[in-house]
Amino acid sequence: MQLVQLSDIHVGSFFKQSVFDTVVEEVNKLKPDAIIITGDLTDEGLLFQFEYVHTQIKKFTCSNIIVLAGNHDYRHTGYLVFKKFFPSKQQIYEFDDAVIMTLGTARPDRDEGEVGYRQNLWMESTLGKYNNNDGNQKKKIKIIAMHHHLIGIPDTGTDKIIIVDAGDTLRACLQSSVDLVICGHKHRPWLWNLGALQIAYAGTASSERYRGFFENSYNIVTIKDGQASVDIKIVGGKRMPLAETVEKYRPYLET
């Protein structure tokens, strides 16, 4: 099974059309089982930006496209416009090899994110049904998709725009035996490993709003034999394990 995670498209003054066209071409060739867009489709949450990004997303040939809102999408009453163009209320998607749960972290006209105790309780009660203790059922990889990041990332400056209840959400993920959390927001590809839990961050797919990683990119998740692995794909360039990006990281002050 193969999933593509796009994030932070940012239709607006920083949007790069030629880059997005390349993303569409590459992703359609991959023929993924699902495309997950983890927020910030627009830059200001304006009607004409939603109209435009909606037409752009239709260029993907994948039949399963999961779209989440980001904090930029919820600006200027964008939270109302977002629902017009992406009205799905479904929050859990089940496949043969995986179950994907989406958590809404964006709040109107706020840059910081919040999950809230209701969503955390719902996560634990829902994902608990997928615990495979008897060995008679095939294990499904548990994936949480959200916009905001759970843990800070290098090269992204002062980390004030966070999930305000990140600790509670991280505890709920661990309690629910989540295998993989995918998020965006910081425009910096990264990967944290917390025991069996991986937290994968996507870069910006098609904007110039870079932070510490100065190429457009997206993530490809492969699920095989009950394991999930994450690759980073540079738009128009190479594909490599996301873990290599972390392993090769060297702070700029290092000599």
Image (tube, rainbow, N blue to C red):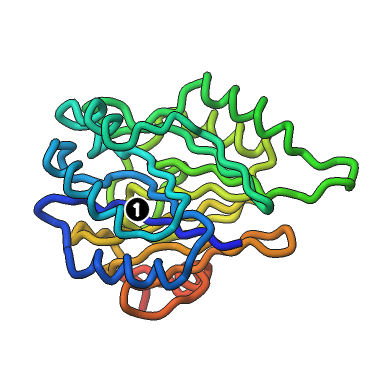
| Residue situated in front as seen by the camera: 118 or 214 | 118
Circle 1 SS class: loop
Question: In the rendering, at what x and y percent does residue 106 appear?
Answer: 34, 32
Position of 188 with respect to 132 (left or right) is left
Quadrant containing the C terminus in the rendered view: bottom left
| Residue situated in front as seen by the camera: 107 or 193 | 107
Compared to residue 131, the image places residue 63 above or below, namely below
- Residue drawn 58% across the image and 46% down it: 143
The total number of labels drawn is 1
- Residue drawn 25% across the image and 61% down it: 206
Position of 239 with respect to 14 (left or right) is right
Question: In the rendering, at what x and y percent does residue 184 appear?
Answer: 38, 50
Residue behind mark 1 = 7
Compared to residue 65, the image places residue 88 above or below, namely above
The three-letter amino acid code for the residue at tag 1 is Ser
Q: Quadrant of residue 122?
A: top right
Residue 254 seen:
yes
Quadrant containing the N terminus in the rendered view: bottom right
Q: Quadrant of residue 238?
A: bottom left
- Residue drawn 58% across the image and 50% down it: 180
- Residue drawn 18% across the image and 26% down it: 77
Question: In the rendering, at what x and y percent does residue 65 appear?
Answer: 43, 49
Question: In the rendering, at what x and y percent does residue 92 appear?
Answer: 55, 36
Residue 161 seen:
no
The crowd level at tag 1 (other Cα within 10 Å; few <14, some 14-19, many 20+) is many
Compared to residue 188, the image places residue 239 above or below, namely below
Position of 156 with respect to 232 (left or right) is left
Position of 115 with respect to 226 (left or right) is left
